[in-house]
Image: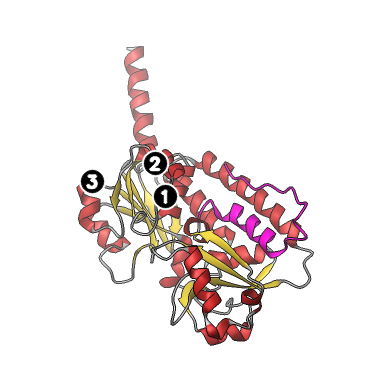
Amino acid sequence: MKNICVFITLLLLTKFASAEIRTVESCGRNLSVEKTPSRAISHDINLTEMMFALELQGQMVGYTGISGWQKLTPEFKKSAGSLPQLAEKTPTIETLLAVNADFFFAGWNYGMRAGGPLTPSTLKPFDITVYELTESCIHIMKKNPSSFNDVYQDILNLGVLFDVEPRAEKLVNQLKVEISKVEAATKHIQHPVKVFLYDSGKNAPFTAGQYAIPNAMIEAAGGTNILNDIQSSWSRTNWETVVERNPDIIIIVNYGKTTAKQKIAFLNAHPALSDVNAIKNRRFVTLEYSEATPGIRNVEATQRLAKAFYPKEFATNTLQVKPQ
């Protein structure tokens, strides 16, 4: 009899534990799950790497939207293990239904678009929970300019939703410590270098405004984004503005069919840019796509930016930023 009572108690405890509702905020809406997602899909490399950093591969059925834009590195393949890529670019609803997905980690312009076929509301009837990348919320609502807090919050929210909060908190604390080292090393800079980020585009350059994570990275590295007055995240501008604001250094985002080397050659040959300081002094620094979009690589990339912005100051700096 005693054993039966113990068994019933354990069953009840298990039932109540599994029914625990966990709630986070996703682009201004309350997002709740009653059970831990077990068939999750992530879209894009930066979001997928966040999942991998939290060791959530066992609760995923795949990822999407990576090799259509860039090569899968050996490091990424090792982390992915046997997880398949379900779509090289943007998936369809059918892609998610085919693997019986119960969770989709994506963002606005990171696999979803307002009014498009994949949104939280279109996936709700199929019992697929959607968590939205915080940086991307600017496309559907008002928010504060992008900061490292956006990345920290995404990691912590994933920790809540997947019931790995201690793991998420540990990772965020590591990232905070490392970014504070970079900020401490650049806070004395009195005359910040002026920085232009070039993603792509020949007639109208595609760049990062104040709601894109590179804006926060540039500031933490002791620079000033010359287009920090753009009230958007990733947006197009014009070459006249770039020339007028005369950047000292240009960040190249390396992805897609056009290589970083080809992008630099295009900028060097652009007649309108010939008198821009960054072009005259051949000052370029390259970021991989996964470093220039919100994710776990932002901190280490920010340290590299600081060293590129101020090579003399960092010539003997032993600061090492290696988030685990």
**Residue under pointer 3:** 100
- Among the two numbered marks 2 and 3 on one chain, the one whose residue lies closer to the N terminus: 2
Magenta region, residue range = 295-324
Distance (Cα) linking label 3 and label 1: 18 Å
Query: Whole-percent x and y of residue 51?
Result: 44, 46
Residue bearing the label numbered 2: 80
Q: CA distance from mark 1 to mark 2?
A: 9 Å
Q: Main secondary structure of the magenta part?
A: loop
Specify whether residue 56 is in view.
no
Q: Look at the image and say whether residue 298 sits in the magenta stretch.
A: yes
- Residue at 52% x, 44% y is 168
Q: Is residue 3 left or right of residue 142?
A: left
Q: Quadrant of residue 180?
A: bottom right
In terms of sequence position, does the residue under pointer 3 or pointer 1 come before the other?
1
Q: How is the image coloured?
A: secondary structure
Classify residue 183 by image quadrant: bottom right
Q: Quadrant of the C terminus?
A: top right
